[in-house]
Amino acid sequence: MNRFSSFLAAIALMPCPALAQSTVLQTEAVPIETEVIAEGLRNPWGLDFLPDGDAIVTERPGRIRILSRGALSKPVAGVPEVAARGQGGLLDIVAAPDFASSNLVFFSFSEPGRGGAGTAVARAKLVRDGASARLEDVTVIFSMAKKTTVTRHFGSRLVFAPDGTLFVTTGDRGERDRAQDMQDHAGSIIRINVDGSIPADNPSPDGSKHLPEIWSKGHRNAQGAAYDPVLGGLLTVEHGDKGGDEVNQPQAGKNYGWPVISYGVSYAGRKIGVGSEAPGYEQPLFYWDPSIAPSGLAVYQGDMFPEWKGDLIVGSLKFALVSRLDRDESGKILGEERMLQGAFGRIRDINVAPDGSIWLLTDERDGRIIRLSRAD
């Protein structure tokens, strides 16, 4: 049985109580059915699909759970200590591209250490033994050098590129000037190999211009990221201050401006930096003003919603909605549709399943996994 067939079989075997919590809603182009397929998660943050149709999900206090046939497992053993304070904790998770043979997973977390905490990434082997599971050979492959007691802006999305390298987003850690410090991991997109080594084609692999792990700088707090086959590169969504949430296409060695340029103002209403543009700093592909507090990003490439092919699906924490950014064949953003506002709560993560359905995570103390499918 292939991965797609396994996934459909797993969906079919989900228990009826989950399917009973379904609603049909109309979007601009198509009616969708929403199903609550899991609940009782404590601030879930990241989710990915396994080849057998199961899903693996993190909870910010420091737990990993596996969703199998509609039921959540007990917490996976072997998770390292996390600094679960403020916005920190156990954050994103992705299965390795070769998971079927390697059983490797990669996860990001706020790592405690000297001076406080900072964004880190670990890899581990997921070992399943009947109903129980554990992590073995846990190895930290990236660790933010400068740790602080500030408990916000960890970034932390993980994305594999087609060449097998791993992109990691970091936030400015609530200290905005760090995003322009080339000897600081904060406010960056990081690119590493799966063992934590530096790719030879990174923009400064010898560290002469900036730290060798850094792919791009000037990011405030990117909590959504995905590889875009349309534009052929990484896309991120990141939080602005009061206004100025951005969609960016981070490219090697480029600077995306925070806090020198921004389309927002400070929470106190003051101007940020020099304005919305300046020489040497890149412009976003799109921005929101007022802010929607974006978290989670998927580039839709499934077959279930051909009307949305190539569109960007973004979660909103502030307005508890899903934003669909309509794109043309070249990848240009043409407009926005807002869906499900207030229906489920703060949307933390967005994932497209192998069958083309869209899965949402709600960042709540009683967090849920929501599946969106075609209703017609």
Image (cartoon, rainbow, N blue to C red):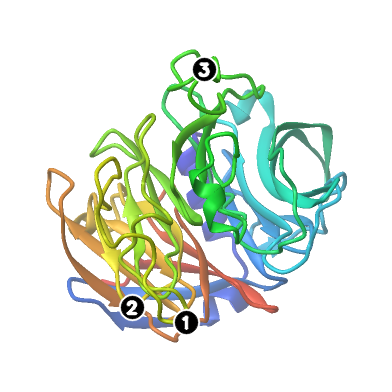
Q: Amino acid at mark 2?
A: Pro
The numbered disc on residue 290 is: 2
Q: Is residue 353 among the parts visible in the rendering?
A: no
Q: Nearer the viewer, mark 1 or mark 3?
A: 1
Q: Nearer the viewer, mark 1 or mark 2?
A: 1
Sequence-first disc among 1 and 3:
3
Sequence-first disc among 2 and 3:
3
Image point (41%, 60%), residue name = 358
Sequence-first disc among 1 and 2:
1
Which percent across, then down, holds residue 39? 66, 74
Q: Quadrant of the C terminus?
A: bottom left
**Marks 1 and 2, how far apart at CA:** 14 Å
Q: Is residue 281 left or right of residue 239?
A: left
Label 1 belongs to which residue? Answer: 268
Question: For mark 1, does the 10 Å Cα neighbourhood hold few (<14), some (14 to 19), or many (20 or more) residues?
Answer: few
Which percent across, then down, holds residue 345? 52, 81
Tell me if residue 39 comes above or below residue 195 in the rendering.
below
Q: Secondary structure at mark 2?
A: loop
Q: Secondary structure at mark 3?
A: loop
Q: Is residue 112 left or right of residue 243?
A: right
The residue closer to the viewer here, 83 or 160, is 83
Q: Secondary structure at mark 1?
A: loop
